[in-house]
Amino acid sequence: MKWMRRAGIVVLSVLLLLTGTGAEAFGGKEKTKEMHLEEAFAGKEGTMVLKNLKNDKVYVYNKERSKERLTPESTFKVANALIGLETAAVRDEYEVKRWDGVEREFESWNRDHSLASAMRESAIWFYQDLARTIGEKKMNEYVSRIEYGNQDISGEIDAFWLDSSLRISAAEQADFIEKLVEEDLPFTEKNQKTVKRMMIQDEQDHFILHGKTGTRLSDMGLGWYVGFIETEKGTWVFSVNIDGTGTEAKNIAVEVLKEKKIIKK
């Protein structure tokens, strides 16, 4: 029940004050196990956090990196969409914004987009326009309420998550996604369900994969893949970042999910 979960969060908050940051406490849990994914990361620096929500077991590769706050890049679209829906900056997942005619990096961006299609194609311009519509005051309020990373939106309102002021760790990303799965974020259940539906990337008989990539486009030197997978046996949340691209991070996540037989090969 949600009230029991909230009570647990209060207790956890007290414990965190006594033991340190959320990332540190997370890394010290008895149910946390180390993963050895050096081969999957192919010599590149990175981390992965994987949590089974059925039994709360957490698996981590490169625990120190999992606590390091990095810019979220396009994974922030998940939070941005939630905030946009909650503040009525966008009506629903189908509302379309007209393309302004400016040619951008990827051909798939150069057309009209809805909230959902811009999430799927990771069209930055749509979510930048959405952030401007939300405005700095409401954006700051909600980023603080959801305790998103360092909660610093001091960069420009339409770019603070893109190699700028906002930073979040892989452990914090996993926690944020878990709250979204449980619909325990400070948004309506309808809006949380909408964003989860928008994140679906692969739907098969035995699983549904929800995720969002993010890449630092300035140098392709930071890639993210965060999300969750629903299976017949339960739900797992995951967060991967790598000194590479979002595509690389996604490939690693899918490979690990297959190796652990969460996704049936």
Image (cartoon, grey):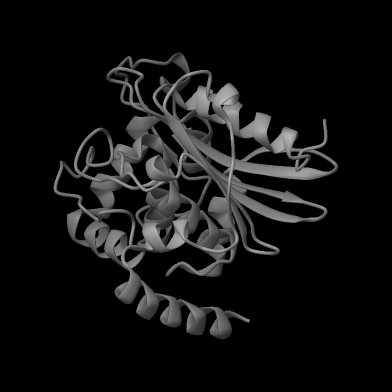
Residue 148 percent coordinates (x, y): 34, 56
One can see residue 75 in this view: yes
Q: Quadrant of residue 164?
A: top left
- Residue 171 drawn above or below residue 106: below
In the image, taking residue 235 as reference, residue 129 lies left or right, namely left
Between 96 and 35, the residue placed more toward the observer is 35
One can see residue 240 in this view: no
Q: Quadrant of residue 216?
A: top left
Residue 260 percent coordinates (x, y): 73, 40
In the image, taking residue 123 as reference, residue 40 lies left or right, namely right
Where the N terminus falls, by quadrant? bottom right
Q: Residue at x 29, y 38 (%)?
A: 128
Between 38 and 154, the residue placed more toward the observer is 38
Between 44 and 95, the residue placed more toward the observer is 44
Between 126 and 201, the residue placed more toward the observer is 201
The residue furthest right is 205
Q: Residue at x 54, y 59 (%)?
A: 178
Residue 138 percent coordinates (x, y): 24, 61
Total number of numbered discs in the rendering:
0
In the image, taking residue 72 as reference, residue 3 lies left or right, namely right
In the image, taking residue 248 as reference, residue 148 lies left or right, namely left
Where the C terminus falls, by quadrant? top right
Residue 71 percent coordinates (x, y): 30, 39
- Residue 220 drawn above or below residue 59: above
